[in-house]
Image: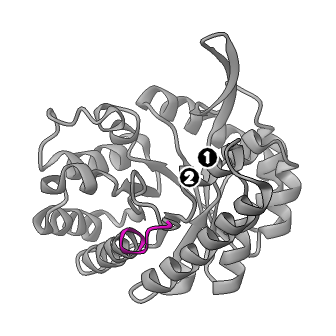
Amino acid sequence: MRIGIDTVDQFGGSFNSYEVGAMTPTSLVDMVKSLHQDLGVDVVEINASVHSVRPDMVTEETLKEIGRYQAKSDVGLTVHLPFRGIDLDNLVEPMRDAAACYQRDLVRAFDANMKVDHYVTHIQSNLLRAIRESKGHTDEAKVRMLARMEDQARRSLETILETCEPKRLAVENLEMGYELPFRLAEEFDTGLCCDVGHLVIEQVDVPGTIAAYLDRIIHFHYHDVIEVEDEGEKKLKDHVALGMGMLDIPATLKVMVDGNFGGVLLVEVVSREYADTSLTVLRKQLQQLTA
């Protein structure tokens, strides 16, 4: 397996709060170089959601420069396709179609300038959770809407696969349920991005779920989960450093090692500090398992 890191300065820094004024057109290039060189990882994942907020940061020249660095350094690259407001299951057809075409065209743009191993996509949106929790709809109405959203997600996958080979597309599970994305990945014969922290939040058998789908998983998002209090209510918070919370790291890694997982194991956290801590924990655990 290859060890990777997301563009943490972007995922957890100014971009995450949409305060992107301080970022420049060279920021993404600098992030890729710095993460690869400073952390010694095999793979860097580019969070392409920045393109939907600051398209000037992801110009053709930006992509060419990342491609030139890749050619010199042999860094592996993956791309997390935009997801903030880019809803592939949108019930409004023109909006769904625009979101899917947007992702499709970004795949084309990245592929023209660099070698991308995997593209990660979300096929579920927050509307799914809102419908499930709604008190204003009957159960029958919810079933109809959720079925329609699933059909919309199918149509979006068809569009994205116009430019991305199925085995390079990794459909990711969110905390609202892994069954649908995993089922559609099988239906379209794509890869899976198994987000381990989301499985923890879902409170399922995490090692067992990984083992059941390991043959289709090409990409892991790996992060820990802690319990926090928010306005008097206890909630689970993900994307924190490995070793901070409730993830059974030895058990999950053992499934990967025993199953000869050959894809990308990517630490997906929200700060450089968390990245440093997580990579130290991860490397130590893998060394113990493979000794």
At numbered mark 2, what does the secondary structure look like: helix, strand or loop?
helix
Predominant secondary structure in magenta? helix
Magenta stretch?
Answer: 91-96
Q: Nearer the viewer, residue 288 or 240?
A: 240
At numbered mark 1, what does the secondary structure look like: helix, strand or loop?
helix
| Residue annotated with mark 2 | 127
Residue at 64 percent of width and 65 percent of height: 145
Count of numbered circles in the view: 2
Say whether residue 287 is visible: no
Q: Residue furthest top?
A: 232
Say whether residue 49 is visible: yes
The image quadrant of residue 212 is bottom right
92 is within the stretch colored magenta? yes
Instruction: Give the vertical position of 233 relative to 275 (above or below).
Output: above
Q: Badge 1 local density, few (<14 within 10 Å), some, or many (20+)?
A: few
85 is within the stretch colored magenta? no
Q: Badge 2 local density, few (<14 within 10 Å), some, or many (20+)?
A: some
Q: Position of residue 182 (x, y in %)?
A: 71, 69
Residue at 55 percent of width and 49 percent of height: 126
Residue at 48 percent of width and 71 percent of height: 118
Rendered image: mark on residue 130 = 1
The answer to the question of whether label 2 and label 1 lie on touching residues, with beta carbons closer than 8 A, is: yes
Left or right? Give the position of 19 relative to 61. Answer: right
Left or right? Give the position of 225 relative to 46. Answer: right
Rendered image: mark on residue 261 = none
Q: Amino acid at mark 1?
A: Ala
Left or right? Give the position of 290 relative to 23. Answer: right
Please name the colour scheme applied to the rendered image.
one colour
The image quadrant of residue 285 is top right
Q: Amino acid at mark 2?
A: Leu
